[in-house]
Amino acid sequence: MRFLLGYGSCGIASGANDVLEGLNEAFSGTEYTVEKVGCNGLCFAEPIVEVITDSGDSILYGRLNKDSAVNFAEKIKKGELPLENRLSEDELKFLNGQKRIVLSGCGKIDPENIDSYIENGGYKALEKAIRMGSDKIIEEIKISGLRGRGGAGFPTHFKWQAAKSAQSDEKYIVCNADEGDPGAFMDRAVLEGDPHRVLEGMMIAGIAIGAESGVIYVRAEYPLAVKRLKIAISQMHEKGYLGKNILGSNFNFDFHIMMGAGAFVCGEETALLASLSGNRGMPVTKPPFPAQKGFRKKPTNINNVETFANVSWIIDNGGEAFASMGTEGSKGTKVFALAGRVKRGGLVEVPMGLTINDIVFGICGGIKNDAKVKAVQMGGPSGGCIPANMLDTVIDYENIAKTGAIMGSGGMIVMDEKTCMVDMAKFFMDFTSKESCGKCVPCRIGTTRMLEILKRITDGEGTCEDIDTLVELGESIKVGALCGLGNSAPNPVLTTIRYFRNEYEEHINNKCCPAKKCTALIQYRIDESMCRGCSLCSRRCPVDAISGVVKSPYKIDSEKCVRCGQCIDSCKFNAINVLSGEESK
C-alpha cells in the first residue's frame, strides 16, 4: 500500500507539513512510508493524500490536518480504510472529462527522485529522439499540430525548423517559465510536480535544432520549483542524462537556471532575452526573430513550460495520437488554472474542443453557493471577459479569439453576480500599467490614461464620453504598442465595455454600482428591524463609524465609514445592507 502526499506549494500552504508530521509519527515503526509528490490538480481539497491499495485501486483523502492524519494512520494500522475525509463521488467528478498528458505525472511521481520519473517511462522519449534525429523529430511535432501554450499559439514545429535552419556554431533552448498572470499557476505546478518532463522536452528540442544548452527562465517567486529543478538537473548528471555523449550518442547537453525578478513584461520573449543577458527586461522589434538572433545573439528557440511538457508524450506516442485530440486548428490538450468563484478550483487538463461550460459546470461543479455565473476572464490581464451567455464557446485558439479574449497561458477566473465588471477591468488595467516596461508611448501613457478614466468612473465622476474614449484609446494601444503586453493590455476593458456596457452607464449616469462593490458609490446602512444591538459590528469597525447602545439598534456614520466590510462579516443577523444609487439616498 502506498501513500502519496501532495507536496506542492498549494499543499504546503494548506498544511501538508503538519499532515506529513502526523503521518510519520503515527507510521513510525511500521512498514508504511509517505511519499511526497506534486500537486495532482485538486487544489480545492488540499492537503491531499492518495492511497494506492495493493490491488491498484486509488482512494483520495482531502482537507486533512495533523489530527485527522493521525486518526487516518491509526485506522490504516488496524487494516481499515477510513471513511472520514474521503473525497466524495461528486468531488471526484473533477477528474471526469480530463485527459492528462502534461499533468500525468503530477501527484503520481516523486519530483525529487529521478528514479520515480524513469519508472514511469521517463527519458524513453529522449532515447527514441536521439535515434530519430532532427528532421524526424520536427516532422513528428508538425504532424502533432502542437502550438505554443504560452498564449500566442504559434506552431511549434515552425519555430523549431527556423532555429534549426539558422547557421551558427552555437544555439540555445530557452524555457519561458516566467508565469506572471494573476490567478495562473499551471507552470508552477508542473515544474514542482514533474520537472523532468519539462527538461526532457527541452533536450528533445535541443536535438531538433542542434542546441547543446538549455536555459530555464523562472521567476524567483517560485522557490520550490527552482529547488526541484536544481535537484533534477543534479540527478540527471549522476545518471548520465546530461553532459557529453549522452546515452552513448554524440549528443551533448546541459542546463542553466536563471531567476527573474518578477517583471510581467519578461513573459514576452524579446524582453525575456534582454533580462537573460543582464539588461533591463524591455522588448525589441522583430525581425530579427530569436530563431535568428536570440540569447547571446545566437539562434534561440523559446517555448513555455507546458509546450515542452507535451513533447516527450508526442515522441513516445506519435504525432498522430496527439493530433487525434482537439479541433481542426487546435490539437491536443490544454491545461487551465481555475480560480475565482468556482466550487472546485485547481488544475484541469482537457482536450481542446470542450466548451467553457464543460469545465466550469461539468468538471468544477459550478459556482460557489450555487450563485449565477456572470463571466469568465480568460488569458489573465492580457485576456478578456466572456459573458455567461457565451460560455458554450468552444475552447480553441480561434473561437476564444472571436470573443475578444485570448487563450493565454491558461488562466481562467470565474466570476459571479457580485463582481463589478468595471472594477474588475480597473484591477487588470492597474496591473498592466504598472507592469509596462515604459519603452513605447502607446503602452506607457495609454494604459495610464485608461486607468485614470476607469478610476474616475468607479469614483462616480465619469462622463458619457468616457466610454467612447476608453474604446478609442484601447484600439489605438492595441495597434501601436511595441510588444504583446501593450497589444493585449486593453482587452479586459474592451470586452467588458462590449458585453457589460450597461454597467459602465450605471456608474456614470446613475452613480450606481450594480454589484455594490465600488466604495465611492455605495453606503452601508443598518436595518433597525433586524439589528439586535449586540454591538459586535461596532467593536469590529476600524474607524469607529458605528455607534449605539447595547440591545438597541446601532447606526453607521456614512461620513466616517470606509466600506471595509468588517461589520457585514461580523453581523450574525444580516442586519447590514449595502445600498447604491437611488436606494442609498
Image (cartoon, grey):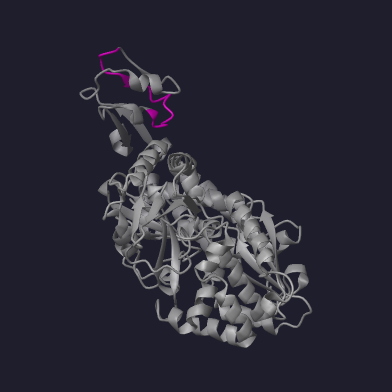
User: Residue 213's quadrant in the figure?
Assistant: bottom right
Residue nearest the observer in this picture, 540 or 171:
171
Query: Is residue 415 placed above or below 169 in the rendered structure?
Result: above
Residue furthest to the right = 169
> Which quarter of the rendered picture does the C terminus lie within?
top left
> Which quarter of the rendered picture does the N terminus lie within?
bottom left
The x, y position of residue 325, in whole percent, is 40, 77
Q: Is residue 558 magenta?
A: yes
Residue nearest the observer in this picture, 370 or 42:
42
The x, y position of residue 449, in whole percent, is 57, 51
Residue range in magenta is: 550-566
The x, y position of residue 120, in whole percent, is 49, 68
Residue nearest the observer in this picture, 310 or 263:
310
User: Residue 95's quadrant in the figure?
Assistant: bottom left
Residue 120 seen from this side: yes
Q: Residue visible at 35% across and 53% down?
A: 60
Q: Residue visible at 62% across and 66% down?
A: 175
The x, y position of residue 88, in whole percent, is 28, 52
